Image (spheres, grey):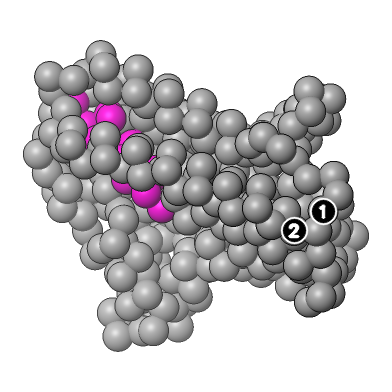
């Protein structure tokens, strides 16, 4: 892929919506059904409806641009739009599950039974050094950069599989979001604060009921608060973090998918360049209180399942005329 070829007209351009766009619309319809069921309990109804209309308008607009100029650049724009909207869909899961009974006491209890402690609470206490916390924060904030690097690599170096990589990655996100919309688990940073770390340290894990219906306070990440990556993590959390989406860890699951897609390219520099950030990501989710250890384990396993399920599924979508 060269700069000149970015504007080359595709003689075999896709006339309709891409497979990933259909997946996004299917998820939108899924959430509309939930909204209809919970309508009287929804808190930000107007904002939720407005956001969905904006999503549809923007998706159709970039499709229209592609129809006028069907080239690699406008195709990339369509995928980029879906990636950007992920940051809106994520906190929206909180609006959908906040009225459901919270299940953190169940998952924290499983954590306690499995490990005999709360790893997320003890991890940062055992390794409190500023340089180590910066590594953890760096790993966590590398989430979207890793995905971006992967998609850009596929676009320029393996363009024939660009839509495949986007399909596997974006569909994995939406499957996670379906789970998050139905499974109200907030994770340690919210649950520990709600019940008190003294109780957590003693293995007291009460049911907080509908506490998170009206509360979204979270614990500050541990470590060196003056660190650059610690600051970036705070900014990311302030922008979009909500008491939702703890189990399984989509950070671990999605980056597992990213690593498998990177391995598929057979580019050693790409794979091994990403590998340290992936390992830091897996550890950091527990270190910064974002997830229970079982969330990270489940995230890794679901990432494997998503990759090996969605790869052949894309082949079936192609046979249906979708790309």
Disc 2 from disc 1: Cα separation: 5 Å
Query: Looking at the magenta stretch, what is its main secondary structure?
Result: helix
Numbered range of the magenta stretch: 87-99
Q: Residue at x 47, y 67 (%)?
A: 141
Quadrant for the N terminus, please: bottom right
Give the vertical position of 2 relative to 54 (above or below): below
The answer to whether 79 appears left or right of 245 in the picture is: right
Q: Residue at x 31, y 70 (%)?
A: 235
The quadrant in which residue 168 appears is: top right
Work out whether residue 226 or residue 199 is closer to the camera in this orientation and state it: 226
Sequence-first tag of 2 and 1: 1
What residue is shown with label 1?
10
- Residue 80 image point, x, y percent: 57, 57
Give the vertical position of 207 relative to 87 (above or below): above
Quadrant for the C terminus, please: top right
Is residue 97 on the magenta stretch?
A: yes
- Secondary structure under badge 2? loop
The answer to whether 283 appears left or right of 311 in the picture is: left
What residue is shown with label 2?
71
Can you see residue 136? no
Q: CB of mark 2 within 8 Å of CB of mark 1?
A: yes
Give the vertical position of 17 relative to 9 (above or below): above
- Secondary structure under badge 1? loop
The answer to whether 207 appears left or right of 66 in the picture is: left
């Amino acid at each position: 892929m060269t700069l000149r070829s970015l504007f080359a007209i595709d003689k075999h351009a896709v006339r309709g919506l891409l497979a990933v766009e259909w997946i996004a619309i299917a998820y939108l319809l899924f959430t509309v059904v939930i909204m209809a069921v919970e309508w009287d309990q929804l808190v930000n109804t107007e904002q939720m409806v407005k956001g969905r209309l904006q999503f549809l308008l923007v998706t159709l607009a970039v499709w229209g641009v592609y129809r006028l100029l069907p080239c690699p650049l406008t195709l990339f724009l369509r995928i980029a739009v879906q990636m950007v909207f992920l940051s809106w869909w994520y906190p929206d899961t909180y609006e959908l599950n906040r009225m459901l009974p919270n299940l953190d006491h169940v998952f924290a209890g499983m954590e306690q039974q499995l490990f005999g402690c709360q790893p997320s609470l003890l991890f940062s206490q055992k390794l409190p050094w500023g340089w180590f916390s910066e590594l953890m924060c760096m790993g966590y904030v590398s989430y979207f950069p890793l995905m971006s690097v992967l998609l850009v690599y596929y676009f320029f170096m393996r363009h024939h599989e660009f839509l495949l990589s986007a399909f596997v990655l974006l569909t994995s996100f939406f499957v996670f979001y379906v789970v998050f919309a139905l499974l109200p688990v907030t994770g340690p940073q919210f649950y520990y604060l709600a019940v008190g770390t003294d109780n957590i340290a003693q293995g007291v894990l009460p049911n907080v009921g509908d506490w998170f219906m009206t509360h979204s306070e979270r614990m500050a990440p541990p470590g060196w608060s003056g660190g650059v990556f610690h600051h970036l993590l705070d900014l990311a959390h302030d922008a979009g973090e909500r008491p939702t989406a703890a189990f399984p860890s989509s950070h671990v699951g999605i980056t597992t998918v990213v690593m498998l897609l990177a391995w598929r390219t057979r580019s050693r520099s790409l794979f091994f360049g990403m590998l340290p950030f992936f390992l830091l990501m897996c550890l950091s989710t527990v270190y910064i209180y974002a997830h229970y250890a079982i969330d990270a384990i489940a995230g890794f396993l679901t990432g494997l399942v998503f990759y090996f399920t969605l790869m052949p599924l894309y082949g079936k979508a192609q046979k249906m005329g979708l790309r």
